[in-house]
């Protein structure tokens, strides 16, 4: 039984590492409106035998039309990554966290998995730094939090257009 469980854990770890892969390109503005910094962070704590991956995508038009992968993080990578975006233009941030852990039911090994999504839309200001965290505890209740690190509050005009953006993503 423990041999099969160990194989399940190793397979899950390899899958998570493979999914982490390289990040996409930055969404900096060519229009000269300056840039803002996004700090994309993991919002979960992995434990032995549990794994997770969070992926962040951004839409530079704020209408959820042109998604670009900005970063993926797993239990085997760092806790955050930093990206530059154009300032003064609305952006939409989509976060997806998938987590899993092995279970044994009726003598059979299996892997329990769950996925959480969140979308936030706001207009970054030049020179500001925004911390974006997709909080995803293993109970499946998740939320996307955006904080302007300069003011310690949510950016003005922050909305959560979940249905509109997830349907088009």
Image (tube, rainbow, N blue to C red):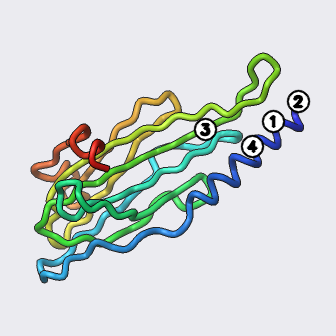
| Residues under numbered marks 1 and 4 in contact, where contact means CB atoms less than 8 Å apart | yes
Query: Which image quadrant: the N terminus?
Result: top right
At label 4, counting other C-alpha atoms closer than 10 Å, the crowd grade (few under 14, some 14-19, many 20 or more) is: many
**From mark 3 to mark 4, how far is it between C-alphas?**
10 Å
Residue at the spot 20% in from the left edge and 51% down from the top edge: 121
Residue 142: quarter of image:
top left
- Residue 121 placement, left or right of 26: left
At numbered mark 1, what does the secondary structure look like: helix, strand or loop?
Answer: helix
**From mark 2 to mark 1, how far is it between C-alphas?**
6 Å
Percent x, y for residue 63? 17, 55
**From mark 4 to mark 2, how far is it between C-alphas?**
13 Å
Judging by the rendered image, the residue that carries numbered circle 1 is 5
Percent x, y for residue 10? 76, 48
| Residues under numbered marks 2 and 1 in contact, where contact means CB atoms less than 8 Å apart | yes
Judging by the rendered image, the residue that carries numbered circle 4 is 9
Percent x, y for residue 98? 51, 43
Residue 100 numbered mark, or none: 3
Residue nearest the viewer, comparing 69 with 133: 69
| Residues under numbered marks 4 and 2 in contact, where contact means CB atoms less than 8 Å apart | no
Residue 1 numbered mark, or none: 2
Q: Considering only vertical position in the picture, is 114 above or below 39?
A: above
Sequence-earlier tag: 4 or 2: 2
Residue at the spot 15% in from the left edge and 72% down from the top edge: 126
Residue nearest the viewer, comparing 162 with 157: 162
| Residues under numbered marks 3 and 4 in contact, where contact means CB atoms less than 8 Å apart | no
């Amino acid at each position: 039984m423990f041999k099969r469980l160990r194989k399940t854990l190793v397979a899950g770890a390899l899958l998570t590492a493979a999914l982490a892969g390289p990040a996409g390109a930055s969404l900096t503005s060519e229009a000269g409106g300056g840039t803002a910094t996004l700090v994309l962070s993991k919002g979960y704590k992995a434990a032995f035998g549990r794994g997770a991956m969070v992926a962040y995508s951004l839409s530079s038009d704020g209408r959820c039309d042109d998604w670009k992968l900005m970063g993926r993080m797993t239990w085997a990578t760092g806790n955050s990554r930093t990206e530059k975006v154009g300032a003064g233009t609305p952006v939409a941030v989509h976060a997806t966290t998938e987590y899993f852990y092995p279970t044994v039911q009726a003598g059979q090994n299996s892997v329990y998995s769950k996925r959480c999504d969140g979308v936030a839309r706001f207009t970054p200001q030049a020179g500001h730094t925004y911390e974006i965290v997709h909080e995803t505890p293993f109970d499946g209740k998740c939320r996307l939090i955006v904080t302007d690190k300069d003011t310690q509050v949510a950016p003005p005009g922050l909305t959560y257009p979940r249905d509109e953006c997830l349907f088009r993503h």
